[in-house]
Amino acid sequence: MANTTQPHPINKKALWLSLAIFAGLVLGGILGLVIPDWAVNITSFISTVYLHALTLMIFPLVFCSLVVGITSIGSISATGKVGGQALLYFVGTTLFASLIGLVLPKTLGIGKGVTIELMEADVEAAPFTGLLDTIRDLIPSNPFAAFANGNMLQVLAFAIIVGVACVSLGKKAKPFIDLCVSVNEIAVKVVSVVMYITPLGVLCSVAGMVHANGLKTILSLASVLGALYLTMFIYIVVVYGVVIVRLIGKFSIKDFFVTVLPAALNAFGTASSSATLPISKRCADELGVSNEISSLALPLGATINMDAVSILMSFMIVFFANACGIEVSFGLLAVVLLSNTLLSIGAPGVPNSAIATFAALSAIAGLPAGVMGMYVSINILADAGVTCCNVLGDIACSVAMQRTCKLEKTETEEAEELAS
């Protein structure tokens, strides 16, 4: 396994791509303020084509990389070790994020003195299911339907089942494993080509977002969005950078953030953790994370790592409650955040997926239905930062696990090391 304690050389091509994506973000924001309505159709078309191209290979990539990763680990117990440690990490950081979201918005008095004009919105609340229902729905009755419907959690479960079965079968499963290796390589190649149009795709995505919300809406919510983004920035630097990457992973903070820039900027521009997953995988590879760890930790994180979502929901609930003159106690907010955790498990990593979740949580908090109209109009502004934060958390987890998750080498790996 690669030694992550050494500084990783900066990939100049990736750095230039990051700068191009950042330029796309800035130009997209400016363009969104000045483009006429008819031009929005053009930016929307380009943005849609880009997202479709980027998401084209997501599920083949996730399934095949997970199967290959499990089989390369070489044992069922080691697979459980990687998955269990990743799950422990995500649960721990989510609980810490929930604690921040529980205390900070109430302490700052987010939304007090703000007057909002409630708007109606036709949004269906996300169904609230219990833990047993979530576990029951984890195993797909039809795996092809899981792929077709974009149910990432079921695809993950199916890939783990197939991967463990391949480990048990040994050489008998080699033809299928070789097929998965080939499909994985094809998917990575397609994503690498799509990366070249990422700056344009991000530019058009941001332009449409800014144009749809308008400068007036953005400025009226600048304070709460500023506090939210500042909180997430501090969380990223302190929790992910200092604690996870530096103290646990023993890796250079500077090298980490420089290397993950493409994934961070793409996540911000597209507001889709699923669409960013292939780029996150490539960044993890450049950070020296082994495929055995990244192929399992990253898809799992894209599905269940909801650190920033917990912060976002608590900020928005408290903001609207204060703006509407409704008292939300710490106890009720704790119930809201617990409910959010259950709702978030297996939620699709696509733009605006938090809208239905907020609809359910706002009902639990007793907020008027009219707040949904305002929330829908600003969701993408917050969702961009939330997605960026969660994606960085996924990669930080894999870097830390590269050091903490010690896997025994397979006989093949030992033979290759002896031969070299």
Image (spheres, rainbow, N blue to C red):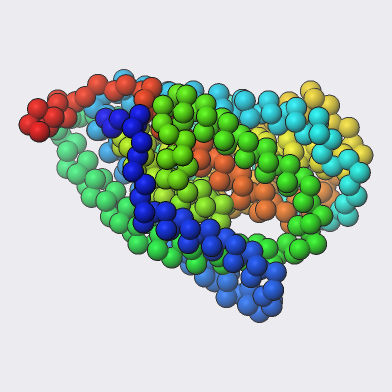
The C terminus lies in quadrant: top left
- In this picture, is 375 found above or below 211? above
Q: Is residue 383 visible?
A: yes
- Quadrant of the rendered structure where residue 248 is? top left
Residue 112: give x, y in percent of width and height.
88, 40
Residue 182: give x, y in percent of width and height.
23, 50
- In this picture, is 279 found above or below 214? above
Q: Is residue 346 visible?
A: no
The residue under the point 25% across, 21% down is 408
- Quadrant of the rendered structure where residue 117 is? bottom right
The residue under the point 57% across, 46% down is 387
Q: Nearer the viewer, residue 77 or 100?
A: 100
The residue under the point 68% across, 25% down is 99
Q: Nearer the viewer, residue 241 or 168?
A: 241
The residue under the point 79% across, 47% down is 223
Q: Nearer the viewer, residue 16 or 294?
A: 16
The N terminus lies in quadrant: top left
The outermost residue toward the left is 419
- Count the marks: 0
Residue 410: give x, y in percent of width and height.
19, 26
- Left or right: residue 45 versus residue 111 is left
Residue 203: give x, y in percent of width and height.
55, 65
- Quadrant of the rendered structure where residue 155 is? top left
